[in-house]
Image (cartoon, rainbow, N blue to C red):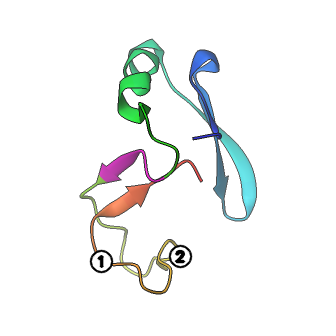
Amino acid sequence: MADLYPPDKRGRITAKGRVEWIHWQSGTAQLLPRLIARRTSGPVFLTDRKAPAGTPDTRRVPGDRPGPALLSPG
């Protein structure tokens, strides 16, 4: 959770090998502390959406179990 900065309404992610910043609005900033309470790592958001056909799955690691797609701060 070190990559999330709720007071600044932003988070740092690594996409395509480079660091980028995501930003959110006030409503999310108010809910985010509840979502990450007592958490030290792991995905923050889950999605049931599938990636477009042909998209390489780079988020899996050996031994990782199949499941929903993960949106993670890093």
Let me know if residue 45 is in the magenta part. Answer: yes
Q: Quadrant of residue 32?
A: top left
Q: Nearer the viewer, residue 51 or 41?
A: 41
Amino acid type, residue under disc 1 in the picture: Pro
Q: Are marks 2 and 1 in contact (CB under 8 Å)?
A: no
Residue at the limit of the structure toward the left, as seen here: 48
Horizontal side of residue 13 vs 33, given as left or right: right
Q: Residue at x 42, y 85 (%)?
A: 63
Residue 33 image point, x, y percent: 43, 24
Judging by the rendered image, the residue that carries numbered circle 1 is 66
Q: Quadrant of residue 27?
A: top left
Residue at the limit of the structure toward the bottom, as seen here: 62
Q: Quadrant of the C terminus?
A: bottom right
Q: Main secondary structure of the magenta part?
A: loop
Q: Nearer the viewer, residue 23 or 72?
A: 72
The stretch in magenta equals: 42-46
Let me know if residue 44 is in the magenta part. Answer: yes
Residue 1 image point, x, y percent: 57, 41
Q: Helix or strand or loop: what does disc 1 sit on?
A: loop
Horizontal side of residue 22 vs 47, given as left or right: right
Judging by the rendered image, the residue that carries numbered circle 2 is 58
Q: Helix or strand or loop: what does disc 2 sit on?
A: loop
Residue at the limit of the structure toward the front, as seen here: 38
Q: Residue at x 64, y 40 (%)?
A: 3
Few, some or many residues within 10 Å of mark 1 (<14, 14–19, 20+): few
Residue 9 image point, x, y percent: 58, 21
Horizontal side of residue 13 vs 17, given as left or right: left
For marks 2 and 1 on the same chain, the one whose residue lies earlier in the sequence: 2
Classify 47 as above or below 59.
above
Amino acid type, residue under disc 2 in the picture: Thr
